[in-house]
Amino acid sequence: MQPDSPDETLVVVRNTADARWWLRSLARALAKREARALEHLRDIERIPRLLSFSNSQLTREWIDAEPMHRAKPENIAYFRHASRLVRQLHTLRLVHNDLAKESNWLVTPDGLPALVDFQLAARSRHRGKLFRMLAHDDVRHLLKHKRSYLPERLTARERRILASPSMVSRVWKATGKRLYRLVTRRILGWSDREGAGDRLHDPRQTR
């Protein structure tokens, strides 16, 4: 689907006012976290631009791309660029925290990686132990995708990273992961679905 005019762009909107009353505080907290992350990463290519944010609504740029599980990237260059993108996040002391989900990884028309869904992203003032564990898991989750599409290109070091999830990752998988997905996807209906045909037009925003 293309914009109807040069002055129209495609956007993704999260409206927390649509959440059930007992979930609105959580919805606003997740949207606020995402807005802060996108603003912090505003100078990085292939990260969606934050267009506006209020207490009830977040509007961000739509990225013209296909989700990883549809595009099935089998070019080693894609994963090299993806690794560089993750390092850029970490250099700015930000971890994504949800890179295991294939739909958060996009493949642009020119075969480059893009990232969406920063609801769980976290910034740190210092590169302390917790930050290093979370950053390690960001890298490990990217490598899981590389293992799915290009297993023969994994290095010995990358295989060691894959075999060593952090304590944070093990605890999250055992406790909060299913609840988070239940709340955000089943109850709130939030999903970053570039390439799925459910994008929104917003004539108020321009390219």
Image (cartoon, rainbow, N blue to C red):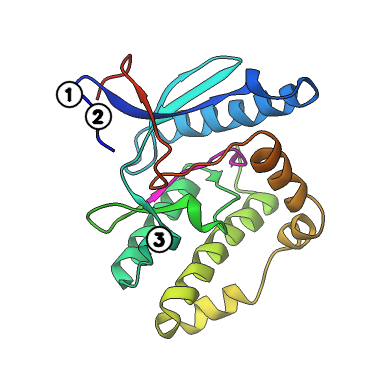
Label located before the other in sequence (2 or 3): 2
Pinpoint residue 73: horizontal percent, then vertical percent. Answer: 35, 67
Is mark 1 in CB contact (under 8 Å) with mark 2?
A: yes
Image: magenta residue range? 114-124
For mark 2, give the secondary structure.
loop
Residue marked by disc 1 = 6
Task: Using residue 55 as the reference point, say whether residue 63 is left or right of it.
Answer: left
Instruction: Locate the N terminus and report the quarter of the image it occupies.
Output: top left
Pinpoint residue 168: horizontal percent, then vertical percent. Answer: 74, 57
Residue marked by disc 2 = 3
Tell me the tag on residue 70: 3
Mark 3 is surrounded, within 10 Å at the Cα level, by few (under 14), some (14 to 19) or many (20 or more) other residues, namely: few
The kind of residue on which mark 3 rests is Arg
Q: Residue at x 55, y 14 (%)?
A: 54
Q: Residue at x 74, y 22 (%)?
A: 25
Instruction: Locate the C terminus and report the quarter of the image it occupies.
Output: top left
Task: Using residue 168 as the reference point, say whether residue 147 is left or right of it.
Answer: left
Label located before the other in sequence (1 or 3): 1
The kind of residue on which mark 2 rests is Pro
Residue 123 located within the stretch drawn in magenta:
yes
Give the Cα distance between marks 2 and 3: 23 Å
Residue 174 located within the stretch drawn in magenta:
no
Q: Nearer the viewer, residue 32 or 69?
A: 69
The kind of residue on which mark 1 rests is Pro
Give the Cα distance between marks 1 and 3: 28 Å
For mark 3, give the secondary structure.
helix
Mark 1 is surrounded, within 10 Å at the Cα level, by few (under 14), some (14 to 19) or many (20 or more) other residues, namely: few
